[in-house]
Amino acid sequence: MSFVSRLLFILALTFSMVQAQPLGKKLLLEKITSAGCPSCPWGDNLLQSYLLNDTNIIPVAIHVNNAGHVDHMFSVDGDSILADYLWAHPTLMVDRYKWPAYSQTSMPNTYWPTMIQDRKQMPMLATIGGATTYTPQRDLTVQVEGTVLWDLNWDLRVNAYLVEDEVTGTGLGYDQLNGYNNTTGHPLFGLGDPIVGYVHNWVLRDMLGGHLGTSIFPNPVAAGHFFSHTFQTTLDSAFDETKCSVILVVQRYDANPENREILNVVKLGLNGNVLAGASEAISKPTLSIWPNPSEGKIQVSVSKAGNWTATLMDLQGRTILEKHLTGNDAELDASPYPAGVYLLRLAAIGEISITQKLILR
C-alpha cells in the first residue's frame, strides 16, 4: 500500500470511528515492583495520581520475588518478563517501548511523565477490543479482536492479562516495606515500615497468551487486516473474582527484548465487552442464518445495520467464501462447496465479530 493510499485509509477509518473512539490509543504501564522494596509504594502513589487525570493509561504491577525482596504476588509469566527487563525497582515500562535516548526499557520514576507523554505522540498502529464471559464455575472466555492500521513487517501477537486489585495478605510477602516512613511531609510518612495490610492494586495474575503473546497474524501484515482470537482459562481459587479484570493486548514479538512494543490495549471486567479502539461499552449484535442445515442458498440477517464482511470458513480456519454486506440482510450462495460443517463470521470495523456454525448438506 502506497503512503497516499495508507493515509487515505487511516483518515477514512478515523472518520468512521470518530464517535466511537474519542480518546484514541491507550497506553499499558507495566510497573516492576515488590512488597519487599522500600521505594515501591511511592511508585504506586505516582501511578494513582496519573490515573486521576488520564483515562487512557492502564497500569499492571509485575511483582518481583527473590531472597532479598520476598513477595507472594509473583507469577510465572511475570518472572519471564522480569528475566528480560528487571534491573531495578520500582521501574516502569510504557508500552514496553525502548527509547534510544534511555538506557533501559524500564526506567525509574523521574522519567515516567516524559515517557507517557512521548508515547502519546506516536501513531496508533492497531485497534483492539473484545468481550469476556465468566461462569459460576470460574471459567473465563476472552475474545480479542481489532484491526491493524498500518503495513507492518513485524511478528504481531495478541494477549490477555488477568489482573487483580485490592490484594492484601498477612505478614512477609504482602506487608509493604516503606522507605518513607520517617520522611516528614511525604505521603507515606508515619504509615509504618512495613505497612501492614497494604492494598496492592493491578497485580498481574496470569497472561493467557504467555509473556510473549499468541501468534495469529501473517508476517508481513497489511493495513486493514482484521484479527480475532479466543482465550479460555479457569480462575485460580485464590483469586478474588470480584476484584479481577482483563487487559486485552496486541503486541510485537522480536528476538531482541528492546523491540517488543505494545501496540494497543483495552481493559474490561469478567463479563463485559468493549468496542475495538473505544472506551465505551457496546452491545453485541446478533446473527441469524437460515435455513441451517442448508442446501447452499442461505439468508443472513444481522440485528445492527452496517458495512459487514461475511466470511465462510472451514473448520481449519481457511476462507472458503467472502462477501461484503451493506445493511442488515443478504443472501449467500454456498452451493458450490462440499457438504460439511463450516463457520460463518460477520465482522465490521468498530464492531465485535459474530460467528455461527453452518451445516451444508
Image (tube, rainbow, N blue to C red):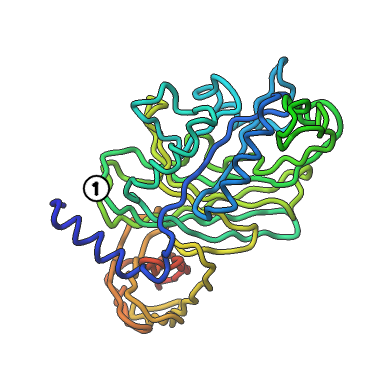
Residue 35: horizontal and vertical position, in percent? 73, 29
- Residue 27 position, x and y percent, is 47, 46
Q: Eyeballing the image, is 246 above or below 347?
A: above
Q: Which is nearer the eye, 345 or 338?
A: 345
Q: Residue at x 49, y 76 (%)?
A: 286
Q: Position of residue 311 (x, y in %)?
A: 34, 66
Residue at 50% x, 24% y is 85
- In the image: residue 108, left or right of residue 308: right
> Which quadrant: the C terminus?
bottom left
Check disc 1 and give the amino acid type. Asp
- In the image, farthest residue toward the top: 67
Residue highlighted by disc 1: 151
Relative to 337, does residue 306 appear above or below in the rendering?
Answer: below
Please tell me in which quadrant of the rendered image residue 326 appears. Answer: bottom left
Q: Is residue 186 above or below residue 291?
A: above
Q: Which residue shows up at 36% across the image and 52% down it? A: 126
